[in-house]
Image: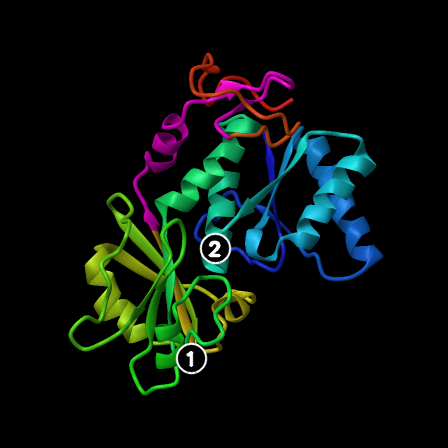
Amino acid sequence: MTAVVLAGDFPSTGILQATVAYRVGLDGGDEACAAFIDHVAYALGQRGAVLVVYPSWKGERARRMVRLARSALLTDRVAGVPLDVPPLALSLIADQLAFASGYARPGVLASLAGRLCESVYAGAWVNSVARMEHIKTGLGAHVSSYLPGNGFAVSAGPRPAVHRISASRPVPEPATRPADPVLMLFGHENGDVEWLQHRLRPVIGAVSVTAVAAQPMSAEYWGTRKYAEFVAFSGHPQALQSLLAGSPYRSCGWCGEPTALPECPFCFMVQPGPDAAPAPGPAAGRAS
């Protein structure tokens, strides 16, 4: 099995209660570094491999910590997995990876992380995009942030977009939609929850909408203290298995770890093209 560690201040949503990712804070000096290494060492001893998930939009310290842990513990069985998703989606995906860790080898699990980011629909209602840094916005959207209105619908993920909410078009057409049944989580800070419930929910066809605690990093991510962040995902019992089986995994030529990524997350060897022989199935073997 593989231990999944989420680096940073991203509390669990509580939706997947049986198995969740370990949470490790990164704030602080030498004590934080020592605590991180101790935590990784313990997880490594328990599971044999560790995936450290962290946000790519705030990843410099996490990347240094991962390199330090690999060096201090003299191991290549610790891999960093940067994900470009908002805080609420990041928390959910880390817990989904922890849930799947009992069914997939470490390299397969690292490959699954990107597929999970593509499978969810994440975004937020925000009152302004004037200070938004992590999602590209046009000059018109920035200017309109200073005008009276109903706010913005912002989509994150593989196809980010910013939509000015209007009476004629209160919700943009989602670029992607999870497989049925669609479940939605949201957390907010002075946000328009009515828009989530009565405008967004019917468009994506969510069968349930669950309020969770606001993520501590959400205000920084969205650039405002008036937001309603959401993530919609599939509640189908075979959703994770379908994602696991949907990628062509190949054995790394150096360390032998099956992966669908261009570079092995453990030994960093660049992988061959798609014509190479595939590796065994996702659940073949256990972490060593």
Position of the C terminus by quadrant: top right
Quick one: SS at disc 1?
Answer: loop
Q: Residues within 10 Å of mark 1 (few under 14, many from 20)?
A: few
Quick one: SS at disc 2?
Answer: loop
Q: Residue 208: x, y in percent? A: 28, 57
Q: Distance of mark 2 from mark 1, alpha carbons?
A: 22 Å
Q: In the rendering, which numbered label is found on residue 133?
A: none
Q: Residue at x 78, y 56 (%)?
A: 32
Left or right position of 153 against 30: left
Q: Residue at x 34, y 49 (%)?
A: 233
Q: Residues within 10 Å of mark 2 (few under 14, many from 20)?
A: some
Residue 77 vs residue 207, the one in the foreground: 77
Say what amino acid the circle numbered 1 marks. Asn
Mark 2 or mark 1: whose residue is earlier in sequence: 2
Q: Is residue 253 above or below residue 166?
A: above
Q: What residue does disc 2 label?
A: 14
Q: Which residue is at the far bottom?
A: 148
Position of the N terminus by quadrant: top right
Residue 41 vs residue 161, the one in the foreground: 161
Q: Residue 110: x, y in percent? A: 53, 34
**Picture quarter containing residue 206?**
bottom left
Q: What residue does disc 1 label?
A: 190
Q: Which residue is at the far left?
A: 168
Would you say residue 240 sits in the magenta stretch?
A: yes
**Picture quarter containing residue 9?**
bottom right
Q: Residue 114: x, y in percent? A: 46, 40
Label 2 with label 1: CB-CB less than 8 Å: no
Q: Residue 258: x, y in percent? A: 53, 21
Say what amino acid the circle numbered 2 marks. Gly
Q: Residue at x 50, y 46 (%)?
A: 95
